[in-house]
């Protein structure tokens, strides 16, 4: 009888250890699927396009960053882009203009952002964008934390498509 108790205890110990290892493995697998490893170099993930011709090539987002701290996109407003509807964002939005002039109205105050300048929109601010030059506006749009791209897709502002091999 004492031999059986010892054997039961050993079996229970091994079973407990095996279950602990299994739980740890499942936790690691779940963490890896929720937070994919980051890509140290990338050409981007996808392109967001609006019916008005606005285009955002997503450079960094959770799918290639491995986290949700930030999203960065290369944004292009076409030369004939007159004015966006007034809107609000749930995340901080930062624009850095590379070329062209971007009308950047925040809470009723209009600014013109030229190459090398930055414009900021805080959550809850009312913003309107427009092209103030005869050429397209190219720049970077930064959302922090990440999630604004998905919010805009779900709201129907953008449609997303994978980047093709020609887009770099």
Image (cartoon, grey):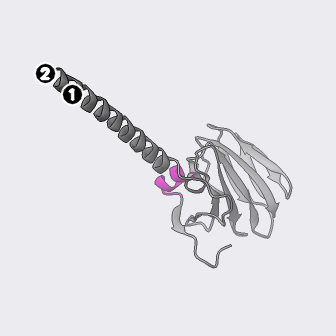
- Residue 141 on the magenta segment: no
**Residue 25: quadrant of the picture:** top left
Picture coordinates of residue 108 (x, y %)? 71, 41
Picture coordinates of residue 76 (x, y %)? 70, 65
What are the residue bounds of the magenta stretch?
Answer: 149-157
Pick the quarter of the image with the C terminus.
Answer: bottom right
Q: How many marks?
A: 2
Residue in the foreground of this view, choosing between 32 and 151? 32
Picture coordinates of residue 148 (x, y %)? 57, 48
Q: Is residue 7 above or below residue 42?
A: above
Picture coordinates of residue 66 (x, y %)? 58, 50
- What main secondary structure does the magenta stretch of the protein show? helix
- Residue 152 on the magenta segment: yes
In this image, 33 relative to 167: left or right? left
Which of the two marks, 1 or 2, is nearer to us in this view? 2
Secondary structure at numbered mark 1:
helix
Circles 1 and 2: CB atoms closer than 8 Å: no
Question: What residue do we see at 22% from left, 29% from top?
Answer: 7
Residue behind mark 1: 8
Question: What residue do we see at 63% from left, 43% from top?
Answer: 69
| Sequence-first disc among 1 and 2 | 2
In this image, 24 relative to 116: left or right? left
Task: For residue 82, say whether it is visible.
Answer: no
Residue behind mark 2: 1
């Amino acid at each position: 009888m004492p031999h059986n108790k010892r054997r039961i205890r050993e079996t229970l110990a091994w079973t407990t250890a095996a279950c602990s290892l299994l739980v740890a493995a499942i936790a690691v697998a779940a963490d890896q699927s929720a937070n994919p490893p980051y890509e140290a170099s990338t050409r981007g993930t996808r392109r967001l396009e609006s019916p008005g011709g606005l285009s955002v090539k997503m450079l960094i987002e959770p799918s290639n960053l491995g986290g949700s701290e930030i999203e960065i996109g290369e944004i292009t407003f076409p030369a004939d882009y007159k004015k966006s509807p007034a809107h609000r964002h749930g995340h901080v939005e930062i624009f850095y203009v590379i070329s062209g002039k971007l009308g950047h109205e925040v809470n009723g105050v209009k600014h013109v952002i030229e190459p090398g300048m930055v414009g900021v929109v805080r959550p809850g601010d009312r913003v309107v964008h427009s092209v103030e030059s005869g050429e397209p506006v190219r720049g970077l749009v930064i959302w922090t934390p990440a999630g604004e791209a998905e919010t805009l897709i779900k709201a129907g502002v953008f449609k997303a498509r994978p980047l093709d091999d020609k887009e770099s």
